[in-house]
Amino acid sequence: MTSTRAALEAAVADHILAIAPYQPGKPVSEIARTFGLQESSIVKLASNENPLGMADSVRAAVARAVQELGRYPDPNGFDLKQDLSRRYQVPADWITLGNGSNDLLELISLVLLGPGVSCVYAEHAFTVYKLCTQERGARHIMVPAVDYGHDLDAMLAAICADTRLLFIANPNNPTGTFLPAEQIDAFLAQVWERHGRQLTVVLDEAYNEYLAPELRFDSAELVRRYPNLIVTRTFSKAYGLAGLRIGYALAQAELTDVLNRVRQPFNVNSVALEAARAALADQDFLQRSYELNQSGKQFLEQCFESLGLDYVPSHGNFILVRVGDAAAINLALLKQGVIVRPVAGDGLPEHLRITIGLPEENQRFAQALAGILQA
Ligand SMILES: Cc1ncc(COP(=O)(O)O)c(C=O)c1O
């Protein structure tokens, strides 16, 4: 008789069995148990969360929304879409809401990928692009990075007759690299001219709110010009709502319509819908989050420079630093209750990704790292 495992493996498609599960940042409770530490003494700089948490105005909206949890959420997120529509000057039927922007990446892959087609993305790009491609049994074309960032010319050249989807992360995670407006626009123009509707481009802007003001550009305007473009954003990062799971996609109505055909009706919960509305309205909190991130980034850059470590200048709320034996240094940091993110799975075995935290958290990390390297 075949074992249960063998029987299951026979029933599951090979492309699913080939997937290596996503490695999330380790939770505080797990590190406390493993290393016998107090939870309160642990610093988590591993998941690119906003160290300020959520704004007080959002907390109040959450408390109100919790009263209504006996009801299903609005399946179309009418109010939030109206707010987003005003903000980006696009019709509400150009907006898709997701259970985090990951959900949107999944929906897009569900609609566009499958066996016999391919997906293009960059080396060291956000790991979920590979996962989405594998899940759908599609072929992935990973284009080598240049200076840790996307090589758009090589990505354009890598597009094949069967390519249906191309992902760009801007800024990228885990490298923090950024492509300016002119390069993105020129790339989109060429893709549209050569491939038209046959190829959809996803511009993933999860860290957009952390960009310096002079680098920000109006990606909704790009959506107006390119019918094959989907821009995704999230409330998980600068808005501080990672635990609530809410993000959105902007694309022209026809593309949005297709995404919504496969979207589960209640994919976004009612607390998240209200919290996102309150978060959008609180631009002061966003500014504070941006400033805290800038000063934390400077502090960490100085720390790396004083330790003689190379780092990749970052446009996000995290920094990639080359430490050498990243696995050993990560373990030593964990033992001291400092959780950061190893990125060997992203093809960067000598690097660690550090989320920028509160000043005292950054200091804890810097002291621990210096102690380990100088021991
Ligand atoms: C580049 C990028 N895109 C998308 C996401 C997904 O975030 P969420 O599903 O929380 O919106 C992340 C999260 O780490 C990310 O780094």
Image: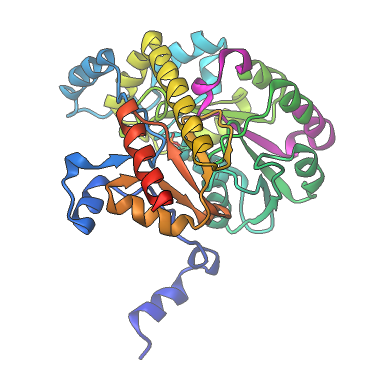
Is 269 in front, or is 170?
A: 170
Is 14 in front, or is 338?
A: 338
Q: Residue at x 80, y 37 (%)?
A: 195
Residue at the outermost right position:
194
Question: Magenta segment range?
Answer: 188-217
Q: Residue at x 45, y 51 (%)?
A: 342
Where is residue 41? Give x, y as percent.
20, 41
Left or right placement of residue 318 versus residue 216 in this view: left
Where is residue 60? Give x, y as percent.
21, 15
Q: Residue at x 51, y 31 (%)?
A: 301
Q: Residue at x 42, y 49 (%)?
A: 374
Left or right placement of residue 51 versus residue 38 in this view: right
Magenta highlight on residue 214: yes
- Residue 347 versus residue 299 in the image, above or below: below
- Residue 220 versus residue 32 in the image, above or below: above
Residue at the outermost front position:
375
- Dividing the picture into quadrants, the one containing residue 89 is top right
